[in-house]
Each structure stands twice: as C-alpha cells, then as structure tokens.
Image (cartoon, rainbow, N blue to C red):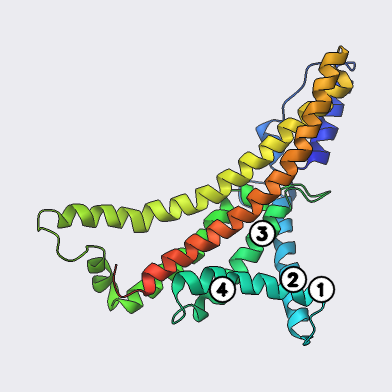
Amino acid sequence: MSLNVLFSQVAVGVAASGGGGEFEAPRVEEFFWPLVGGNSYWALTRPAIVLLLSVAVIGWFFVTVAGRLTVVPSKRQFVAETAYDFVRNTIARDIIGAKDFKPFLPLLLTVFTMILFNNVMGIFPFVQFPTMSRIAFPIVLTAIIYITYHAVAIKRKHGVGGYLKSLVPPGLPGWLKPIMFVLEFLTYFFIRPLTLALRLFGNMLAGHLMLLVFILGGEYLLLHGSNIGIQASGVLGLGFGVVMTFFELLVQFLQAFIFTLLSALYISDAVSEHH
C-alpha cells in the first residue's frame, strides 16, 4: 500500500479523534484501490497500472537501446548489456547448459527484468507498492513458466506417456515405483508451482508490511507521543525504516534472481535427457 495514502489515513483518523486518538491500523478494504470498475467482475487497480507501466518502460528501454548499439556503450546500453549478460551467463547458460539455453533466454530476461522493476516500485517515491505483493501476478508468471516447462518436457520425452514415465527413476524396486511416481507427480505439478509463486508473493508482502510498521509507527510515535521517550522511539523507528528500505532493495533483487534461477532450473530439468 502507498505510504502517502496511509499517512493521509492516519492524519484523518487523528484529526477525527481530536488529535489524541489511538493509532488506527489500515483495514483490509483499504488495500483494494479500484481506479475503474470495482465490482465483483473486474477492476483496473493501481497495481495493474504499475504492471502495465513496467511492460511499457522495459519494452521501450530495450528496443531503443537495441536500435542504437555502439562499440563504446552509452550508460543506457551499459545497463541493458549488464542485465542481459547477467541473465545469459549467470542464470541461463550455467543452469540450462550451453547447448539448450538460447531459446529460453528471452523468457528468462523478461521475467527477471519485469519482476525486478515491479519489486523496486515498493520503495520508489510516490508509488511505494511492490506489484508482486498481489498474489495474482506471481501466479500468472508461474503459470507461464510451468506451461513452458511441461510443454518442453512432453516434447523432449516423446509425449505425455514418456514424460510421466520419466518421473520414476530407473532401477527402483517394483513396490517403490508407485510411491515415487505419486511423490514426483505432486512435486512437479503442484508443489513447485505453488512454492515458486508463494515465495515471491510472501517476501514482497512481508517486506512491504515491515516498512509500513517502522515508518508509520515511527511517524505516529514522533508526532503524537506523550513524552520525550516515546518521541525518541519514534525517531529510532524512522531510522530503522530507512535502514530496512536499503535491506528491502537487496531482497527485491534477490527475489527476482531466485525466481528466474528456479525457472531456469526447472526448464533445465525438462530439457535434460535424464530425470
């Protein structure tokens, strides 16, 4: 949720109570901001606007840089090449392998830059909302990865039958094969996509709430504390908020990296000849 919106809500609550009321925590309804619509069927929300903006900005950035490549790179070209080289060499080639990584490089680069951009929006002034803290967005990204993963696995392993057969490692005793098949089926079709989406969602939501606690709590204690000790704790809370903002930036990068890394790892498993 935007810090600016929450600051205004706190101010309204304090004013309504004569300036000395208790702190009012934001309600669940305040985390849904429909700009257009808002009924049970559809709504255009601020997180959706941020996501659409990220697609436009990232697309514009890479297209314009690609059209003006020079031997001595400009600052924009340097940033684009750094992101490309990082995903290509550190993630795609090392995880999937030099033989098979190229067809999946555009997907992995798009996923990494898109998640990173939207994560950073959580600390960007006047936005201050990480898009991926809304569970629908990680679910859609995970669905794209898993459609790719299963499609490649089915193609490489000669159809659905061959793919399902590959879930059971060769050489197992007969009585153990059904157990292993059930465990592997649950892992590949349910546990992996669930954990991939929830990991990104949970970290972005928890980090954002942590910043809200420090910043809003510190602001309230500083401005409305009844004595100097409480006001000093408010200053301390705001200081921790600043420190945790830089820590959150690190977490935002790591979550984009981990999501892309695991996506490459799962795709690598699909293209490999052996389970």
Q: Kindly report which numbered mark, 1 or 3, lies closer to the viewer in this rendering.
A: 1
Q: Which of the numbered marks, if any, corresponds to residue 75?
A: 1
- Asked if marks 2 and 1 touch (Cβ < 8 Å), the reply is yes
150 relative position to 165: left or right: right
Residue at image point 54% right, 62% down: 260
Residue 266 seen anywhere in this rendered image of the structure: yes
What residue sits right under mark 4 in the picture? 89
Residue 88 in the image: above or below residue 174: below
Q: Which of the numbered marks, if any, corresponds to residue 116?
A: 3
Q: Kindly report which numbered mark, 3 or 2, lies closer to the viewer in this rendering.
A: 2
Q: Kindly report which numbered mark, 4 or 3, lies closer to the viewer in this rendering.
A: 4
Counting residues from the start of the chain, the first of labels 1 and 4 encountered is 1
Which amino acid, mark 2?
Val
203 relative position to 178: left or right: right
Residue at image point 49% right, 71% down: 94
Which amino acid, mark 1?
Lys
- Whole-Å distance between the Cαs marked 4 and 3? 18 Å
Circle 4: element type: helix
Circle 2 Cα neighbour tier, 10 Å, few/some/many (<14 / 14–19 / ≥20): some
What residue sits right under mark 2 in the picture? 79
Q: Which quadrant of the view contains residue 105?
A: bottom right
Residue at image point 66% right, 59% down: 116
